[in-house]
Image (spheres, rainbow, N blue to C red):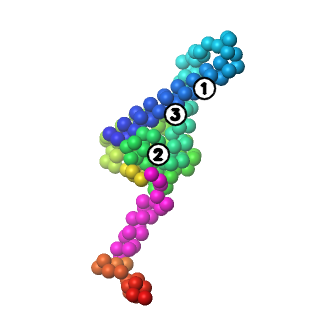
Amino acid sequence: MSRGVAAIVDGLVVVVLLGMLYLAFAALGFLIDPTGFAFPVPGREALVLAWFVLAVLYLSVCWAGTARTVGDQLLGLRVLGARGFRLRWGQACVRALACVLFPWGLLWILAGRHRRSLQDLLLRTVVIYDWGPRLPRTSPATREAKDDGERKARPDGEGNEDEEEGEDS
Protein backbone atom coordinates (compact mmCIF):
# COMPACT_ATOMS: atom_id res chain seq x y z
CA MET A 1 0.00 0.00 0.00
CA SER A 2 2.70 2.49 0.99
CA ARG A 3 4.75 1.80 -2.15
CA GLY A 4 1.70 2.44 -4.33
CA VAL A 5 1.03 5.75 -2.58
CA ALA A 6 4.71 6.68 -2.96
CA ALA A 7 4.49 5.90 -6.69
CA ILE A 8 1.43 8.15 -7.04
CA VAL A 9 3.20 10.98 -5.20
CA ASP A 10 6.24 10.54 -7.45
CA GLY A 11 3.99 10.63 -10.52
CA LEU A 12 2.58 13.94 -9.31
CA VAL A 13 6.09 15.28 -8.71
CA VAL A 14 7.04 14.40 -12.29
CA VAL A 15 3.89 16.16 -13.60
CA VAL A 16 4.77 19.29 -11.57
CA LEU A 17 8.35 19.16 -12.89
CA LEU A 18 7.00 18.81 -16.42
CA GLY A 19 4.80 21.86 -15.87
CA MET A 20 7.79 23.82 -14.59
CA LEU A 21 9.81 22.75 -17.62
CA TYR A 22 6.98 23.94 -19.91
CA LEU A 23 6.85 27.31 -18.14
CA ALA A 24 10.62 27.68 -18.42
CA PHE A 25 10.43 26.91 -22.13
CA ALA A 26 7.61 29.45 -22.53
CA ALA A 27 9.58 32.08 -20.58
CA LEU A 28 12.57 31.51 -22.84
CA GLY A 29 10.32 32.05 -25.86
CA PHE A 30 9.04 35.28 -24.31
CA LEU A 31 12.57 36.52 -23.63
CA ILE A 32 13.62 35.81 -27.20
CA ASP A 33 10.60 37.47 -28.86
CA PRO A 34 8.31 39.35 -26.45
CA THR A 35 6.18 41.01 -29.16
CA GLY A 36 5.43 37.82 -31.09
CA PHE A 37 5.13 35.58 -28.03
CA ALA A 38 2.51 32.84 -27.91
CA PHE A 39 2.44 29.93 -25.49
CA PRO A 40 3.93 26.86 -27.16
CA VAL A 41 1.58 24.00 -27.99
CA PRO A 42 3.62 20.79 -27.77
CA GLY A 43 2.42 17.70 -29.58
CA ARG A 44 1.30 14.56 -27.77
CA GLU A 45 4.47 12.70 -28.74
CA ALA A 46 6.66 15.49 -27.38
CA LEU A 47 4.76 15.48 -24.06
CA VAL A 48 4.98 11.71 -23.69
CA LEU A 49 8.70 11.72 -24.52
CA ALA A 50 9.37 14.61 -22.11
CA TRP A 51 7.39 12.87 -19.34
CA PHE A 52 9.25 9.59 -19.94
CA VAL A 53 12.71 11.18 -19.90
CA LEU A 54 11.88 13.34 -16.87
CA ALA A 55 10.43 10.39 -14.92
CA VAL A 56 13.46 8.18 -15.58
CA LEU A 57 15.84 11.02 -14.73
CA TYR A 58 13.97 11.91 -11.53
CA LEU A 59 13.85 8.31 -10.26
CA SER A 60 17.48 7.60 -11.21
CA VAL A 61 18.86 10.70 -9.52
CA CYS A 62 16.81 10.14 -6.36
CA TRP A 63 17.62 6.43 -6.01
CA ALA A 64 21.33 6.83 -6.78
CA GLY A 65 21.62 9.97 -4.64
CA THR A 66 19.64 9.58 -1.42
CA ALA A 67 18.09 6.15 -2.11
CA ARG A 68 14.62 7.69 -1.89
CA THR A 69 12.23 9.80 -3.90
CA VAL A 70 9.87 12.45 -2.56
CA GLY A 71 7.14 9.82 -2.26
CA ASP A 72 9.53 7.44 -0.50
CA GLN A 73 10.54 10.21 1.91
CA LEU A 74 6.92 10.96 2.81
CA LEU A 75 6.21 7.28 3.54
CA GLY A 76 9.53 6.36 5.14
CA LEU A 77 10.78 4.11 2.33
CA ARG A 78 14.29 3.65 0.99
CA VAL A 79 15.46 1.67 -2.08
CA LEU A 80 18.68 -0.27 -1.58
CA GLY A 81 20.73 -2.85 -3.41
CA ALA A 82 20.67 -6.49 -2.29
CA ARG A 83 23.56 -5.91 0.14
CA GLY A 84 21.88 -2.95 1.77
CA PHE A 85 23.76 -0.10 0.12
CA ARG A 86 22.56 2.74 -2.09
CA LEU A 87 22.05 1.81 -5.75
CA ARG A 88 24.81 2.51 -8.25
CA TRP A 89 23.96 4.88 -11.11
CA GLY A 90 23.58 2.10 -13.67
CA GLN A 91 21.36 0.03 -11.41
CA ALA A 92 19.27 3.09 -10.51
CA CYS A 93 18.78 3.93 -14.21
CA VAL A 94 17.77 0.38 -15.14
CA ARG A 95 15.36 0.22 -12.18
CA ALA A 96 13.89 3.59 -13.16
CA LEU A 97 13.42 2.42 -16.76
CA ALA A 98 11.76 -0.78 -15.55
CA CYS A 99 9.44 1.12 -13.21
CA VAL A 100 8.40 3.64 -15.87
CA LEU A 101 7.98 1.09 -18.67
CA PHE A 102 6.31 -1.62 -16.53
CA PRO A 103 4.54 0.09 -13.61
CA TRP A 104 2.27 -2.92 -13.12
CA GLY A 105 5.34 -4.82 -11.84
CA LEU A 106 4.56 -3.11 -8.54
CA LEU A 107 1.44 -5.28 -8.28
CA TRP A 108 3.65 -8.33 -7.67
CA ILE A 109 3.96 -7.06 -4.10
CA LEU A 110 0.42 -8.28 -3.49
CA ALA A 111 1.18 -11.81 -4.71
CA GLY A 112 4.77 -12.29 -3.62
CA ARG A 113 5.65 -13.73 -0.25
CA HIS A 114 8.43 -11.22 0.39
CA ARG A 115 6.45 -8.18 -0.81
CA ARG A 116 8.92 -7.32 -3.57
CA SER A 117 8.00 -5.92 -6.97
CA LEU A 118 9.07 -7.58 -10.21
CA GLN A 119 11.63 -4.81 -10.59
CA ASP A 120 13.04 -5.66 -7.15
CA LEU A 121 13.26 -9.34 -7.99
CA LEU A 122 14.89 -8.84 -11.40
CA LEU A 123 17.36 -6.18 -10.28
CA ARG A 124 18.02 -7.55 -6.79
CA THR A 125 16.87 -4.45 -4.97
CA VAL A 126 14.96 -4.10 -1.72
CA VAL A 127 12.68 -1.43 -0.33
CA ILE A 128 12.91 -0.93 3.42
CA TYR A 129 11.18 1.28 5.93
CA ASP A 130 13.67 3.88 7.08
CA TRP A 131 12.54 7.15 8.65
CA GLY A 132 16.09 8.39 9.20
CA PRO A 133 17.17 11.45 7.24
CA ARG A 134 20.42 9.89 5.99
CA LEU A 135 21.58 6.57 4.69
CA PRO A 136 23.35 4.54 7.41
CA ARG A 137 27.14 4.19 6.97
CA THR A 138 26.91 0.41 7.14
CA SER A 139 24.47 -1.88 5.40
CA PRO A 140 21.64 -3.54 7.34
CA ALA A 141 23.35 -6.92 6.76
CA THR A 142 26.61 -5.62 8.26
CA ARG A 143 24.81 -4.20 11.30
CA GLU A 144 22.98 -7.52 11.86
CA ALA A 145 26.24 -9.48 11.58
CA LYS A 146 27.92 -7.10 14.04
CA ASP A 147 25.00 -7.43 16.47
CA ASP A 148 25.13 -11.23 16.17
CA GLY A 149 28.90 -11.16 16.80
CA GLU A 150 28.44 -9.06 19.93
CA ARG A 151 25.76 -11.44 21.20
CA LYS A 152 28.06 -14.42 20.62
CA ALA A 153 30.95 -12.68 22.39
CA ARG A 154 28.71 -11.84 25.36
CA PRO A 155 26.24 -14.70 25.80
CA ASP A 156 25.40 -13.70 29.36
CA GLY A 157 25.08 -10.00 28.54
CA GLU A 158 28.24 -9.12 30.51
CA GLY A 159 31.11 -7.15 28.97
CA ASN A 160 34.49 -8.82 28.64
CA GLU A 161 37.20 -8.39 31.27
CA ASP A 162 39.21 -5.84 29.27
CA GLU A 163 36.28 -3.44 29.18
CA GLU A 164 35.61 -3.87 32.92
CA GLU A 165 39.28 -3.23 33.79
CA GLY A 166 39.32 -0.14 31.56
CA GLU A 167 36.37 1.31 33.48
CA ASP A 168 38.17 1.01 36.86
CA SER A 169 41.36 2.81 35.82
Asked whether 142 falls inside the magenta stretch, the response is yes
- Is 104 above or below relative to 90? above
Residue type at tag 1: Ala
Q: Quadrant of the C terminus?
A: bottom left
Q: Which element type, helix, strand or loop, lies under badge 1?
A: helix
Estimate the spatial distance between the alpha carbons at disc 2 and disc 1, rounded to whole Å. 26 Å
Residue visible at 48% across and 28% down?
Answer: 15
Can you tell which quarter of the image residue 156 is in?
A: bottom left
Task: List the residue tagged with mark 2.
Answer: 68
Q: Nearer the viewer, residue 97 or 68?
A: 68
Seen from this angle, which residue lies furthest right? 32
- Is 139 above or below relative to 22? below
- Across and down, in percent, residue 89 comes to 57, 47
Residue 102 visible in this rendered orientation of the protein: no
Q: Quadrant of the N terminus?
A: top left
Q: Which residues are magenta?
A: 133-152
Of tags 3 and 2, the one toward the viewer is 2
Residue visible at 53% across and 37% down?
Answer: 58
Estimate the spatial distance between the alpha carbons at disc 3 and disc 2, rounded to whole Å. 14 Å
